Image (cartoon, grey):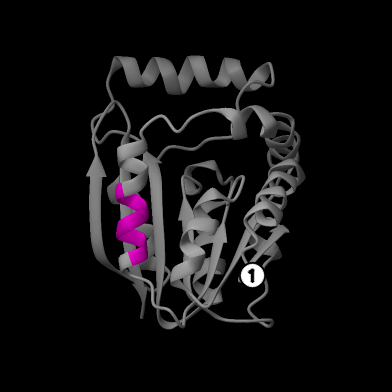
Amino acid sequence: MAALSKDVAFWSKISRKYAASPIRDMDGYLMTLERTKSHLKSEDKVLEIGCGTGSTALLIAPHVAHITATDLSLGMIEIANEKLVRESVGNVTFKVAEVLDHSSDDVSYDAVLAHNLLHLLPALDSALEYISSLIKPGGLFISKTVCAPEHGGFKYAMISKVAIPFMQAIGKAPFVDFITAETLERKMNGVGFDIVEKTDKIGMFTSRYIVARKS
């Protein structure tokens, strides 16, 4: 919990700067967005966890019945609600929430989205199990996750073991825990998801896009 509380402050502090920064890989973002939309239906109730400043949720909204989008950072959600007012979208709800704050007693979702989130969670196993509980049988969990390379390497080791811990120590980076894409898939399988689609963007870190169906 200590790591998580630090991250709340970190993301709120950088929220305005984050919102003003251009997307580094716009082509990759748009491809992910289009692939995600292709799996959603007009009658779907959708949850996006780790929505940031809400841009993706607002672009998904015209293609679903309703999308609830959450982030642990109040600063991020304030910006998301500002966008919501400007764009006058009626089927989006933005909320401040951590993963375990969502309740399956309130609603079960046809799809849960988590883009660029899973490697930032201190307790991934319990988070995946909880996310599964929020999804209807046959529903989808759609994620994109920065993963460790399968065979590591010196440059990766220097970044993950030296540079990132130093940045975290001075408050310039959040908690991260990189696992391989294969390990991530095994963890998803372990909580009742079947992988139906996946693709990678390969670099020093693998970015794996996964569409998984709840058994």
Circle 1: element type: loop
| Residue 33 magenta-highlighted | yes
Name the residue rendered at 23%, 34% in the picture.
202
Q: Which residue is mark 1?
A: 90
Q: Is residue 11 above or below residue 164?
A: below
In this rendering, position of residue 56 left or right of residue 28: right
| Residue 40 magenta-highlighted | no
Name the residue rendered at 34%, 47% in the picture.
30
State the quadrant of the N terminus: top right
Q: Amino acid at mark 1?
A: Gly
Q: Specify the quadrant of the image occupied by residue 201.
A: top left
Q: Main secondary structure of the magenta part?
A: helix
Q: Which residues are magenta?
A: 31-37
Name the residue rendered at 58%, 51% in the picture.
51
Q: Specify the quadrant of the image occupied by residue 200.
A: top left
In this rendering, position of residue 115 left or right of residue 89: left
Task: List x then y, in percent, for residue 113.
Answer: 47, 61
Task: List x then y, in percent, for residue 7.
Answer: 69, 37
Determine if residue 185 is in view.
no
In this rendering, position of residue 20 left or right of residue 163: right
Task: List x then y, in percent, for residue 49.
Answer: 57, 57
Q: Nearer the viewer, residue 183 or 56?
A: 56
Q: Is residue 80 above or below residue 44?
A: above
Name the residue rendered at 54%, 57% in the picture.
58
